[in-house]
């Protein structure tokens, strides 16, 4: 009887399970990662300084009284409605939508009046809006 010797097989490493595990880890990290959302609204925050800045450009100024009455360049708007305010702004500003618009509101003005003015300016397409403030006392 002849005994056959089997050739020694070299041990091998099966890479398929390792690839599956790495692939599953990759998917897990991709799914659980939170991505930073970019803000849709771009806001340029105001800066304060000790020196007054003078601007020689024509400026559209909307003043809002304590009672919520609107004044555009010292001319009172008769009706406090949004449509009337937009019409008055458009009439005074003309076609120049690049001119700066400043909203000056009394400290005790109803918040809705300021928002209405800001909304009217935005709907007309003005791009340069600022809100006037005074330095804090003390």
Image (cartoon, rainbow, N blue to C red):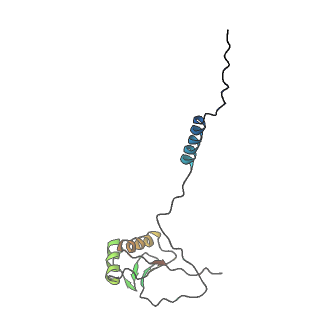
Q: Is residue 93 left or right of residue 111?
A: left
Residue drawn at the location 61% of the way across and 86% of the way down = 50
- The count of marks equals 0
Rendering quarter of residue 84: bottom left
In this rendered view, identify the residue nearer to me: 126 or 74. Answer: 126
Residue lying furthest front in this view?
2
Question: Percent position (x, y) of residue 104?
Answer: 47, 80
Q: Determine whether 40 is above or below 10 in the image.
A: below
Question: In which quadrant will I find the N terminus?
Answer: top right
* Residue 51 shows up from this direction: yes
In this rendered view, identify the residue nearer to me: 23 or 92. Answer: 23
Residue lying furthest top in this view?
1
Q: Determine whether 47 is above or below 52 in the image.
A: above
In this rendered view, identify the residue nearer to me: 137 or 60. Answer: 60
Question: In which quadrant will I find the C terminus?
Answer: bottom right
Residue drawn at the location 31% of the way across and 77% of the way down = 87
* Residue 81 shows up from this direction: no
Rendering quarter of residue 79: bottom left
Q: Is residue 26 left or right of residue 95?
A: right
Question: Percent position (x, y) of residue 80?
Answer: 36, 74
Q: Is residue 90 left or right of residue 37?
A: left
Question: Percent position (x, y) of residue 132?
Answer: 50, 80
Q: Determine whether 91 is above or below 22 in the image.
A: below
Residue drawn at the location 40% of the way across and 78% of the way down = 70
Q: Is residue 120 left or right of residue 53?
A: left
């Amino acid at each position: 009887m002849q005994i056959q010797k089997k050739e020694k097989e070299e041990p091998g490493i099966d890479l398929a399970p390792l690839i599956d595990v790495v692939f599953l880890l990759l998917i897990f990290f991709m799914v659980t990662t939170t991505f930073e959302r970019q803000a849709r609204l771009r806001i340029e925050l105001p800066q304060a300084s000790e020196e007054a800045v003078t601007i020689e450009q024509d400026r559209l100024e909307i003043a809002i009284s304590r009672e919520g009455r609107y004044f555009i360049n010292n001319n009172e708007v008769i009706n406090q409605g949004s449509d009337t305010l937009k019409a008055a702004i458009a009439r005074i500003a003309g076609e120049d939508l690049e001119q700066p618009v400043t909203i000056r509101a009394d400290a005790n003005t109803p918040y809705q009046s300021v928002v209405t003015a800001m909304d009217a300016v935005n709907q007309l397409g003005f791009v340069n809006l600022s809100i006037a403030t005074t330095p804090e006392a003390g």
